[in-house]
Amino acid sequence: MVSAEALCAIAGIPPIDLLVQERGRIDEANVEVTTALKKRERLRTIEEWQLRWDRNNDKAQWTKRLIPHLGAWTECRQRRTGYFLTQFLSGHGSFRVYTNRIGKANDNLCIYCKNVDIAEHTIFECLKWASNRHRFEMDAGRYLTPDNIVQYMLGSTANYELTANYISTIMKKKETEERESQAEEKRRQDQR
């Protein structure tokens, strides 16, 4: 299950308790509610959320690594997440460490290269996707890592779309092949 911390970050929506506090500050301001007041209070909410995010050393560590700066992520106009991009950003999807944890795989190993299969491995390391990765990096004009990929995405709509397409292409194909592998494994077990 994806943590609330990761979901809030990916969605770009501050935790509800911080939003309630923000609304309370606006209501208690005893001044006309203006766009400037709302922006100031939202900035304060984002700052408080960032402090909480920085102190969090327990949950959503993969998401935190990818999205270290919540303000930049939430302000991104081109930010749109979908099924496959959310899998990557949360680390919950067609990654054997995750599917093994939820009982859909027998081990943590990549079906292609037998390395431990986590989001980082799939998108940045697995040899199965080397040609996709090379094309993506050539188009991006840089070597991308978990520590700079979101910063690159936020640079422009074109960067965001290029990255989302790269991730979605790999994740879609991998999910299909993973499901085929699971079905084959089940057939073998049923024949025993």
Image (cartoon, rainbow, N blue to C red):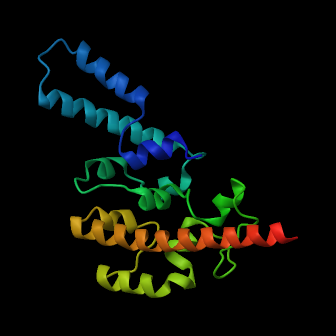
Q: Is residue 64 left or right of residue 20?
A: right
Quarter placement of the C terminus? bottom right
* 106 vs 24: above or below: below
Q: Is residue 188 left or right of residue 110?
A: right
Residue 74 image position (x, y, % from top left) = 31, 47
Which residue ends up furthest to the front in the rendered image? 191
Residue 109 image position (x, y, % from top left) = 70, 72
Q: Is residue 156 visible?
A: no
Residue at x 32%, y 68% (from the top left corner): 152
Residue at x 49%, y 42% (from the top left corner): 5
* 181 vs 73: above or below: below
* 36 vs 176: above or below: above
Residue at x 29%, y 55% (from the top left corner): 79
Say which quarter of the image contains residue 105: bottom right
Residue 179 image position (x, y, % from top left) = 61, 67
Tag count in the figure? 0
Residue 36 image position (x, y, % from top left) = 13, 31
Q: Is residue 172 left or right of residue 42?
A: right
* 126 vs 39: above or below: below
Residue at x 40%, y 80% (from the top left corner): 143
Say which quarter of the image contains residue 18: top left
Q: Is residue 173 visible?
A: yes
